[in-house]
Amino acid sequence: MTTYNEADLQKKAKDHLWMHFARQSVMEDGHGVPIIVKGKGHHIWDSKGKQYFDGLSGLFVVNAGHGRRRLAEVAAKQAEELAFFPIWSYAHPNAIELADRLAGYAPGDLNRVFFSTGGGEAVETAFKLAKYYWKLQGRPTKHKVISRAVAYHGTPQGALAITGIPAMKEMFEPVTPGGFRVPNTNYYRAKEMGFDGTIEAFGLWAANRIEEMILFEGPETVAAVFLEPVQNSGGCFPPPPGYFQRVREICDQYDVLLVADEVITGFGRIGNMFASTTYGFEPDMITCAKGMTSGYSPIGATIVSEKVYEPFKHGTTAFYHGYTFGGHPVSSAVALANLDIFEEEKLNANVRENSPVFRQTLEKLKDLPIVGDVRGDGYFFGIELVKDKATRETFTDDESERLLRGFLSKALYDAGLYCRADDRGDPVIQLAPPLTIGPAEFDEIEGILRGVLTEAWTKL
């Protein structure tokens, strides 16, 4: 492994690096920043040589695991042959082949693929396309979008309007208008939303809140509903039984497009190439990114149904939107090779087979007084932390700050587990490891979490 001058890197980082979603004061105060220099399988190493378990796949990204030489070699070969060419009125073989591949994986007639370079851009594309589609149908007042409370859909101005986390938007207001929120599917907190009943009934109740919002705003003004199959922010909320089937009915009834934001849930995270397939519904558009290349090169895509694409097949109509690096030749080549690995190693089947074991292993932690709920699906789970299990009382903002940032983030890292301790919503720990692991690694994760959470409870 390459050796690094730790002090020199820390100084350069302090002087020049502006990190994303991070408090720069950590570096300004002299604490420094963890510097990750190597990855292999489900492990990463820092610049001091310490090894960690990557329990978050980088950022829900490295689905096939770190250190795949095959993907690096594919990238190098493609860069030597054709490093770059845009798909602005031109094409290249890898973009064509990847579009064909994605259309084959997508449910129903989602056959048209518009490339971008990441998830936020894919969501931005879907938002703009939804509004333009309805204008082309002679219904220009349909411009509003509905999403769920606490849901994260990206940082571009349009995607930010869809994001349901007020604290992430207030500093950038006024944001793009037209975003409206409905309840999410956190069954653990259903009573606080005003619902008390079975999980099956909760699914219908939550879906019907979408109908309620459409009617309140006026169906003639609503363009699309954006939903993650499993909501990330807030801590991995899976859909209750029947939820998406009812949402699909509602969207069809009121002529509203349904967009599945699969930036995280796509490419095996829930056990199929797309979680829309897992949950048995056909959206009008799918947004995806992260796991498409397992992070070995950046790419994103918006996959569109024939219905939405149809107006663009004729005459002079064009979608005046795009990105310089969308469908990049190197990224497309890496994506194709990455998807080959998925199929050859049966990674989706591995997730489907072992997900129940992963859940059962994590649920052992519910014997700890600080663990209120374990939820999720596939290889994507959240552990909600509570102050009182009996009443489900959560922590105050100050308590969350001390628990998550004051103790848990560092303690988990020191214990050798990289994951996410998050308080967008109630305090949670999120896990999304590479899709290559199995029961032995689940036990390792549970053991680290048990030790750290036991200590955390004693510090409350």
Image (cartoon, rainbow, N blue to C red):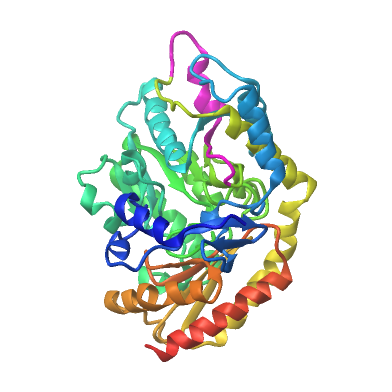
Residue 437 shows in the view: yes
Q: Is residue 298 above or below residue 135?
A: below
Q: Residue at x 27, y 67 (%)?
A: 29
Q: On the picture, is 241 further left or further right than 319?
A: right
- Asked if residue 310 is among those painted magenta in the image, a careful observer would answer yes
Residue 103 shows in the view: no
Q: Residue at x 40, y 72 (%)?
A: 427
Q: Nearer the viewer, residue 408 or 301?
A: 408
Q: On the picture, is 311 further left or further right than 146?
A: right
Q: Is residue 361 above or below residue 114?
A: below
Residue 358, position in %: x, y?
Answer: 66, 70
Tag count in the figure? 0
Q: Nearer the viewer, residue 284 or 2?
A: 2
The N terminus appears in which quarter of the rendering?
Answer: bottom right
Q: Nearer the viewer, residue 215 or 439?
A: 439
Q: On the picture, is 257 further left or further right than 32?
A: right
Q: Residue at x 45, y 61 (%)?
A: 6
The magenta-colored residue range is: 295-318
Residue 80, position in %: x, y?
Answer: 63, 26
- Asked if residue 188 is among those painted magenta in the image, a careful observer would answer no
Q: Residue 218's quadrant in the figure?
A: top left
Q: Is residue 242 above or below residue 144?
A: below
The C terminus appears in which quarter of the rendering?
Answer: bottom left
Residue 140, position in %: x, y?
Answer: 32, 26
Residue lying at the far top in this picture: please name it. Answer: 315
Q: Residue at x 61, y 28 (%)?
A: 79
Q: Is residue 88 above or below residue 290?
A: above
